[in-house]
Image (cartoon, rainbow, N blue to C red):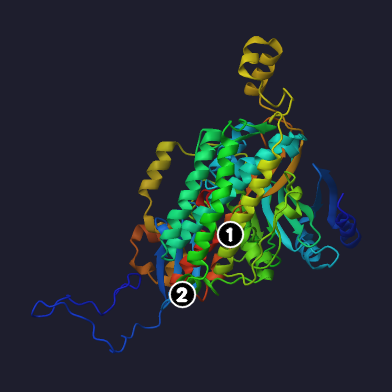
């Protein structure tokens, strides 16, 4: 008998001689299934793997002995493509890496390119980018919450979470014209300023969103099934989490109070009043608590950002970096020359290299750019947070039951567009 | 300039190459043979305490004369300090460097990715296999500058190869040995796996 196919000796025709369905009598000793390990394959097309992740699992009975993840089904070679693109042309590629928080990826890339070129952005642009980042954090955590609760058998929070995500998506669409492929930043500014009724719409969202959060909290946090499925599962200690280079909610759930927004502030995050959410036990339950609370912290930041949103331009005034308005490009000789040079040659960056890490919903999204003085980077490296967080999965899952593997894998919060890039 | 550079020079002397600053980040070059000692020292010395590995990657320049660089991003979570350590390798020569997995487990997949994309061999890595490309991929290392953007084969040839591949060729030898299923494979696939470099056949010790 092939050991790869799980066929038990229990197989029966299903009905007895009289046509009645056979039932396995209770109390019968379990058949001797042997002691050899079993190999099963999960994915790449499986809803519980949250994308095209394939896990080959070695099982002893129902206990996971080893997990071998297989990646690369969504590999698109973004980093290679970036070496053949101008800096502004790379921004649409960043949408497609972590496609659950596209605006935050846009911001991460723009910040790195601006650090490389020594550009200081305008105050209004800074606040708008904070709004973009925190909106992304909420939608990403909402998707995580919804899909994870479905994995563990709770359907209602999924509907609530996706409804909230839909409201953010509407605002995103109002601002950028796209729901997913936002491409909202440019080097030195933004693709567009926010439309007139955006601020009112976002204010309405920040007022009503906490109600949904408290509803989700009431349904899940003290739910016996949820607690039983998540507490004590997939534990990583603080030392292990640091040694595995984890970041974001995964690191903080293990009790390490590290948040890039606080510890290496960008976009004036040090001037906002918010708390770094830290867990205690490093299990799936604490990761849930951390992400849930991060949503309300993100909501707080959004409210403060809306209050302080200054007037003024969103783009810097440098015509070598920012495209002139179309009307001027068609009527003004100088503006037309700048327009031509930017479109044909691109914006040149000085020789050097820059690394900027931002606190994305999944963890620290790093953008490492190396320039040799031309308009295209020599190397564009994405430090992918969910790729690195996923690398701890075999360590976390060993010794747990197969059903816990699903919970642990969900708690990592992977998005395969970013893992495979 | 990050004060760790002077401390490194005082401890390791000539193994520390030049140090420079770019956009506010300190970069220090380390001799290839001293890498593992330097990394362990940077992590374990209390005044340094670079306990967090941010990233491992590589950079190959368009200028063929310049060496290929392996880049390590280090961070001290307690001191909030960053340091970028680089090792230079000759792109035409031996692309081998010691693995830092004994120091940071987080380097595991990052080094596999650098191997997969650049062909850098990390000595001492517990499981150095391709990670994003499939294990039987033979076209080379995609992020090297001599690798064409569209790949080495035409689109038609790539599709043909993909359709001709046996789907089970995506099981690694390690997994097949768990399953003891090797004997049941078709003959052509056994042959294909036998040609693979990174698998170990169950019957060949």
In depth, the one of B130 and A48 nearer the eye is A48
**Residue A47 appearing in the image:** yes
**Residue B205 appearing in the image:** no
In depth, the one of B94 and A206 nearer the eye is A206
Q: Residue furthest left?
A: A18
Vertical comparison of B89 with B180: above or below: above
The chain holding disc 1 is A
Side of B25 where A290 appears, left or right: left
Q: Where does label 2 land, which residue?
A: A401
Q: Earlier in the sequence, mark 2 or mark 1?
A: 1
x and y percentages locating residue B159 in the rendered image: 39, 42
The chain holding disc 2 is A
The kind of secondary structure element at disc 1 is: helix
Q: Quadrant of residue A94?
A: top right
Vertical comparison of B184 with A127: above or below: below
Side of A316 where A13 appears, left or right: left
Question: Do tags 2 and 1 sit on the same chain?
Answer: yes
What residue is drawn where x is 74% and y is 33%? A122
Side of A213 where B84 appears, left or right: right
What residue is drawn where x is 58% and y is 47%? A206
Vertical comparison of A399 with A217: above or below: below
x and y percentages locating residue B174 in the rendered image: 48, 67
x and y percentages locating residue A126 in the rendered image: 71, 39
Q: Where does label 1 land, which residue?
A: A291
- In the rendered structure, find residue A195 and report the number of the disc placed on it: none
The kind of secondary structure element at disc 2 is: loop
Q: Quadrant of residue A235?
A: bottom right
């Amino acid at each position: 008998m092939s050991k790869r196919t799980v066929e038990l000796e229990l197989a029966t025709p299903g009905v007895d001689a009289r046509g009645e369905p056979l039932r396995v009598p209770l109390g019968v000793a379990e058949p001797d299934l042997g002691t050899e390990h079993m190999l099963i394959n999960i994915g790449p097309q499986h809803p519980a793997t949250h994308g095209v992740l394939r896990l080959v699992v070695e099982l002893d009975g129902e206990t996971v002995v080893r997990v071998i993840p297989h990646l690369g089904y969504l590999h698109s070679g973004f980093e290679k493509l970036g070496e053949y693109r101008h800096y502004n042309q790379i921004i649409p590629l960043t949408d497609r890496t972590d496609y659950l928080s596209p605006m935050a990826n846009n911001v991460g890339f723009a910040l790195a390119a601006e650090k490389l070129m020594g550009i200081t952005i305008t105050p209004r642009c800074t606040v708008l980018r904070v709004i973009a980042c925190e909106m992304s954090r909420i939608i990403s955590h909402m998707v995580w919450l919804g899909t994870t609760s479905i994995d563990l058998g709770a359907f209602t929070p999924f509907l609530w979470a996706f409804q909230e995500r839909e409201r953010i998506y509407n605002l995103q669409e109002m601002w950028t014209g796209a729901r997913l492929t936002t491409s909202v930043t440019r080097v030195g500014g933004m693709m567009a300023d926010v439309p007139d009724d955006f601020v009112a719409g976002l204010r309405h969202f920040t007022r009503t969103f906490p109600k949904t959060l408290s509803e989700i909290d009431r349904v899940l946090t003290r739910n016996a099934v949820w607690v039983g499925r998540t507490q004590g599962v997939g534990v990583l200690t603080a030392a292990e989490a640091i040694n595995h280079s984890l970041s974001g909610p995964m690191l903080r759930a293990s009790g390490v109070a590290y948040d890039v927004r606080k510890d290496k502030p960008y976009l004036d995050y040090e001037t906002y009043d918010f708390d770094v959410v830290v867990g205690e036990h490093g299990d799936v339950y604490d990761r849930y608590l951390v992400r849930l609370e991060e949503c309300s912290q993100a909501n707080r930041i959004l409210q403060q950002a809306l209050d302080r949103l200054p007037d003024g331009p969103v783009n810097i005034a440098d015509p070598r970096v920012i495209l002139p308005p179309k009307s001027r490009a068609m009527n003004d000789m100088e503006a037309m020359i700048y327009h031509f040079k930017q479109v044909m040659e691109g914006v040149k960056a000085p020789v050097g290299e820059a690394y900027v890490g931002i606190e994305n919903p999944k963890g620290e999204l790093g953008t490492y750019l190396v320039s040799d003085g031309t308009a295209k980077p020599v190397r564009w490296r994405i430090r992918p947070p969910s790729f690195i967080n996923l690398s701890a999965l075999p360590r976390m899952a060993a010794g747990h039951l197969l059903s816990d593997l699903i919970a642990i894998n969900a708690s990592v919060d992977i998005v395969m567009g970013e893992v495979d890039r | 300039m990050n004060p760790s550079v002077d401390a490194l020079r005082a401890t390791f002397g000539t193994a520390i190459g030049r140090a420079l600053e770019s956009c506010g980040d300190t970069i220090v070059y380390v001799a290839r043979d001293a890498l593992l000692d330097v990394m362990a020292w940077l992590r374990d010395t209390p005044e340094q305490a670079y306990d967090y590995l941010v990233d491992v990657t590589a950079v190959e320049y368009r200028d063929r004369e310049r060496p290929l660089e392996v880049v390590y991003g280090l961070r001290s979570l307690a001191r909030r300090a960053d340091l970028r350590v680089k090792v230079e390798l000759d792109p035409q020569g031996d692309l081998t460097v010691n693995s830092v997995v004994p120091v940071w487990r987080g380097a595991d997949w990052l080094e596999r990715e650098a191997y997969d994309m650049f062909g850098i061999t990390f000595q001492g890595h517990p499981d150095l296999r391709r990670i994003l490309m499939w294990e039987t991929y033979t076209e080379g290392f995609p992020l090297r500058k001599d690798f064409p953007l569209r790949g080495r084969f035409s689109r038609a040839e790539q599709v043909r190869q993909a359709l001709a591949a046996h789907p089970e060729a995506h099981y690694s030898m390690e997994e097949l040995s768990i399953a003891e299923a090797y004997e049941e494979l078709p003959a052509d696939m056994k042959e294909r796996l036998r040609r693979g470099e990174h698998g170990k056949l169950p019957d060949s010790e």
